[in-house]
Image (cartoon, rainbow, N blue to C red):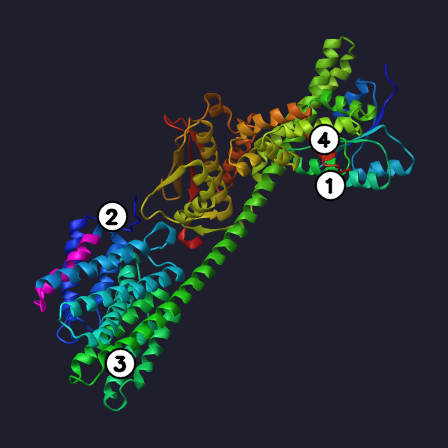
Amino acid sequence: MTAPIHIAVIDDDEPVLDSLRLYFARQSIEASCFASAKDFLAAIARGDRFDCVVSDVRMPGMSGLDLVHRLKSEGLAAPVVLITGHGDVDMAVAAIKVGAFDFIEKPFDEARLLASIRDAIENKRQPANDGTELEKLRSRLNSLSARQRQVMDLAVAGLSNKEIGSRLKISPKTVENHRAWVMERIGARNIADLVRIAMQIQGKP
Amino acid sequence: MAFPRVFDVNKLIVGGVYLAAYAVLDWISFIGPYAHLGITPWNPGTGFSFALVLLFGQRMIPFLLVSPLVADFLNQQFTMPWTIEVLSAALLGGGYSIALAILLRPNFRFDPTLTSMRDLILLMAVAVVGAAVVASGYVGLTVAGHQLPMEDFWAATLHYWVGDVIGITVVAPFALFALTRRRMLPLTMETALQFVAIGLALALVFGLAQERQFQLFYVLFLPIVWLAVRTGLEGVSVGILVTQLGLILGIQLSPAGTFDVTAFQALMLVLAATGLVAGALVTERRRTEAQLRLQQESLSRLSRLGSMGELAAAVAHELNQPLMAAGTYTRLVDDAMTSGNTDVRVVAETAKKAVAQVERAAEVVRHLRALVRLDRSSRAPYRFERIVQEMIELCQPDLDRAHVTVQTTLAAGLPQVMVDLLQIEQVLINLVRNAIEAIGESGSPHGSVLIDAKPVDADFIEVRVVDSGPGFPPQFLESAFLPLSSHKAEGLGIGLALCRSIVEAHGGQLWLDDSSHGAAIRFTLPIAKTDER
């Protein structure tokens, strides 16, 4: 079907790690599991290489965010998909900004994680370096209303619908509507996508 | 156009009281008149007129027009032809009415209760200019009516002006404070000493007056500045009034002709203005300090709330881990069963793992109580009234935004409760925020939360929190305390479970009530025993 995939899964929670190991085994994906970022880096130091790294954000010792920083500074190209818990979205957005590929909120469906891993490996959503593509995105962005733009900026900053609502003095439901519209216009599948696109348009790395 | 007014009382009653007081003040202050005219060294009635309009609104202006006539009639001081009397009354009342109407214009943003230095300065400026216009007009009228020779115009105008300005400066602030402040002076030994000092200074001024005329007047500044520095604007306004009354009394008791009364009043004017400005400065500084303190307190409270938020996030994390693993295991079982490609032993193994994770989640819930760090040392006796008050202050911005009001019915003589202040505050905040959200989601433009508390027995008080929202959904009443069955994305379930854990950790209980109107929650808190205090 496709070329064999070898991924690394990092989570400090043993049952979570075990369930993912079983899942990936069933999907015929070779998954090396690590209980901490330190163990994972030790494997890297031994010369192990992975097509994709799946990591929890909140871990004792080195966090997922630290790990993204570290991989980047060591020039390792493997894309990172982060798993985040409730209330860690701002941390995840920060991780996207420093180069993580995607983040998925817990609890999630494994199929969603797998899709993200495949996207990451195929590098589907490589930044649209193409000038015309970027131009198209810009004009779509300009077609947003001022309010939609505000909602987008706050969402990209990592705020929840509730926080955005109280900041803009509108109900979380209205925020959700604006947000859905923004995603639709921009062509973002999720918040991680939105953060990446917003960064491209603003010309940041 | 709606004019600002501080009080809304029956106009005729207020007007009647005002006219009577004006006549009395006019009678008391009718000393040392200039020539045979009604130009006296101080006109307290004018200050009273200012206070009347500033506090009761511009609808009181008609009374200003008749008060000079009524007073002159009652005190039998009609010394001029009636045409001039009527005209001068109209000029007096009309002139000050216009001055006050200008002062109350919305663009001046004048606060009649004199809460800032700016308000005080505005009032004094209007007094100085208004009195100048009225004084020259009044004296001009008497000159035109041949009641006064032309060469006296300037001297008479000056007398009149000083008399009115001092009347306003001494009486208006005092009257404004007396009617709008709960307390003007602290009842302490120091206050008593301050007034004794005023008395001594007055005695000195008049006792040695024969030799030294005005030289000793400056002694009067000492007690006034003392009062200003220690009690602020409200206190000093009392001191100024007392000093003025003392001066007038002293002048009355001295042999006629000892003093140039108007010169004395000019000095008094300087004293009053100095005292008021110093008092206003002190009051403003104190207010700034109080605001600073309040902000610091709310900052530290916010950080306390932040740590409770972190606790909730930790609980969510604790629950998410087993939930996620259980989900994955279960889907694996499902997948294996449906695909038919199964090793029964592996499937059974996976299902067992899923069950273990569900049990782990249940364990988290059971031990939620342990997560609410139970440090008994932070428990102390508190007045429940205070806890409620603090909670309302903390929630005020949210309440205002959602147009929700909090009503409290706390039983009289509620005993103190033995609690961890932070945790119980957090329980109330949680309940009130849930209520605000429920009311907001029901689409109602405003709502209310009722908190009542009463003792149930010797050991516990019972608190009830009822909101005007749509109430709990029926299925929620049964499952509210399984955090897994959160009603909303924000996790009402976790919040309520935390509330219950905190209450139970205190030895109390928490119930959801099936209320016919809105959600109702009851909980008990332990009463502080005397030996624990």
**Can you tell which of label 1 and label 4 is closer to the viewer?**
4
CA–CA distance between discs 3 and 2? 40 Å
Q: Is residue B76 among what the camera can see?
A: yes
Placement of the C terminus of chain B among the 4 image quadrants = bottom left
Q: For this rendering, which residue is in front, B476 or A116? A: A116
Above or below for A188 versus A77: above
- On residue A197, the disc is 4
**Can you tell which of label 1 and label 3 is closer to the viewer?**
3
Mark 3 or 2 closer to N-term?
Answer: 2
Pointer 2 local density, CA inside 10 Å: few below 14, some 14–19, many at least 20:
few
Q: Which residues are magenta?
A: B61-81
Residue with the mark numbered 1: A60
**Can you tell which of label 2 and label 1 is closer to the viewer?**
2
Q: Amino acid at mark 4?
A: Ile
- On residue B17, the disc is none
Residue closest to the far right: A47
- On residue B8, the disc is 2
- Work out whether disc 2 and disc 4 sit on a shared chain: no
